Image (spheres, rainbow, N blue to C red):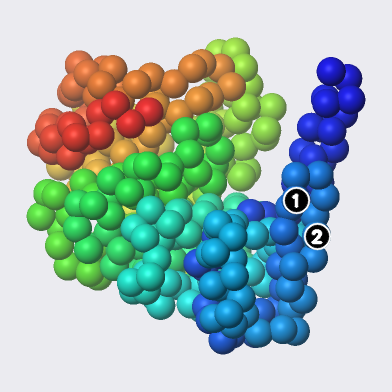
């Protein structure tokens, strides 16, 4: 038993140094700028060096051996993410990739981009990457209801700022589309604000952000500042559409005036912000947090409907209908 546990711990330690990637995220006849590795259950083995092209023969061999995931070292993570961003449109339209894998590639790429943004939100290239990702995600979501339900299947329900940001962006885009926001530009502006809505939390100390018990009033006051801080951070790049700033600042405002940071109410709250508020609250309730277990989707929706003076009732009703087919997904 002890030897088995040692083997498991050793395997986990090895895997921590690598990022699992989908084989179908790699484009045939392209030269990669990162090494590809295979995990054989106990060791990581170099499969293909970065200077070698990824050929059709290579892909066929992997498929024949039922290998769907390869590994890239943490040190070369950025090169892989840059590669995916450059090829995302072809990945999204490749008929050889099944819908679930395609959606998983988009979701994983989005989390990595948000991780970079949260590391340095004032770095222009990070914001540009988030913009490009939102545009691709919007085009993916516009392909229909199946795209949204596939996103639900791959979502992470263990809370992190990265997964939460991507989840809120996904919910917001689907809710916006279902309530009449159908132009690509509108959805890109909304999606950008939704993806970056919590960027101000990087200025909240970790001991407050991940505190297991209830927050003291002074600690909660610090948390209340994150919408303002988010706008200030992103404004330094001056790269996103002006309307995208609005949900970053207003996503904690509430219809009954009980929200923050400005105590807005009713029509003073932008429609984009109302959408993101619903998406943000729902994802917060249905993901695992350090201080409480997640609610199931049905309970979260019922709770929000019970608190409907705080949320736009029209949007809540639409969101409940949207989530109805997937109410048991988590």
Residue found 62% across the figure and 37% down from its top: 204
Question: Is 9 displayed left or right of 274 in the figure?
Answer: right
Residue 24 position, x and y percent, is: 50, 67
Residue 16 position, x and y percent, is: 76, 45
Residue found 79% across the figure and 40% down from its top: 11
Question: Is 104 displayed left or right of 318 in the figure?
Answer: right
Nearer to us in this view, 122 or 64:
64
Residue named by callout 1? 40
Report the Cα–Cα distance between label 1 and label 2: 7 Å
Nearer to us in this view, 53 or 225:
53
Residue pushed farthest front? 64
Residue 257 seen in render = no
Tell me if residue 289 comes above or below residue 78 in the rendering: above
Residue 150 seen in render = yes
Residue named by callout 2? 45
Tell me if residue 260 comes above or below residue 237 in the rendering: above
Residue 113 position, x and y percent, is: 55, 60
Residue found 51% across the figure and 16% down from its top: 292
Element type at mark 2: strand
Tell me if residue 124 comes above or below residue 55 in the rendering: above
Element type at mark 1: loop
Residue found 56% across the figure and 17% down from its top: 291
């Amino acid at each position: 038993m002890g030897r088995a546990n040692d083997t498991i711990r050793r395997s986990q330690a090895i895997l921590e140094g690598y990022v699992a990637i989908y084989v179908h995220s790699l484009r045939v006849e392209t030269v990669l700028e990162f090494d590809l590795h295979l995990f054989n259950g106990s060791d990581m083995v170099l499969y293909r060096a970065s200077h070698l092209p990824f050929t059709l023969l290579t892909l066929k061999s992997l498929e024949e051996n039922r290998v769907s995931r390869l590994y890239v070292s943490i040190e070369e993570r950025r090169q892989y993410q840059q590669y995916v961003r450059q090829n995302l449109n072809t990945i999204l339209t490749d008929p050889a990739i099944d819908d679930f894998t395609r959606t998983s590639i988009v979701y994983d790429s989005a989390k990595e981009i948000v991780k970079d943004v949260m590391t340095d939100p004032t770095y222009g290239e990070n914001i540009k990457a988030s913009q490009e990702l939102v545009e691709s995600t919007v085009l993916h979501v516009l392909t229909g209801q199946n795209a949204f339900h596939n996103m639900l299947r791959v979502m992470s329900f263990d809370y992190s700022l990265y997964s939460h940001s991507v989840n809120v962006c996904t919910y917001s885009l689907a809710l916006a589309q279902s309530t009449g926001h159908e132009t690509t530009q509108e959805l890109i502006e909304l999606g950008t604000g939704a993806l970056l809505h919590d960027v101000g939390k990087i200025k909240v100390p970790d001991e407050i952000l991940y505190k297991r018990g209830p927050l003291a009033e002074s600690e909660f006051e610090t948390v209340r500042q994150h919408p303002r801080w988010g706008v200030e951070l992103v404004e330094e790049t001056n790269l996103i559409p002006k309307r995208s700033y609005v949900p970053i600042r207003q996503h904690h405002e509430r219809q009954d005036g009980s929200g923050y940071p400005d105590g807005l109410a009713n029509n003073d709250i932008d429609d984009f912000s109302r959408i993101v508020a619903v998406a943000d609250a729902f994802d917060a309730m249905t993901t695992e947090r350090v201080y409480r277990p997640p609610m199931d989707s049905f309970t979260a929706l019922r709770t929000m409907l019970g608190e409907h003076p705080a949320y736009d009732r029209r949007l809540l009703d639409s969101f409940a209908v949207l989530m109805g087919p997937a109410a048991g997904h988590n």
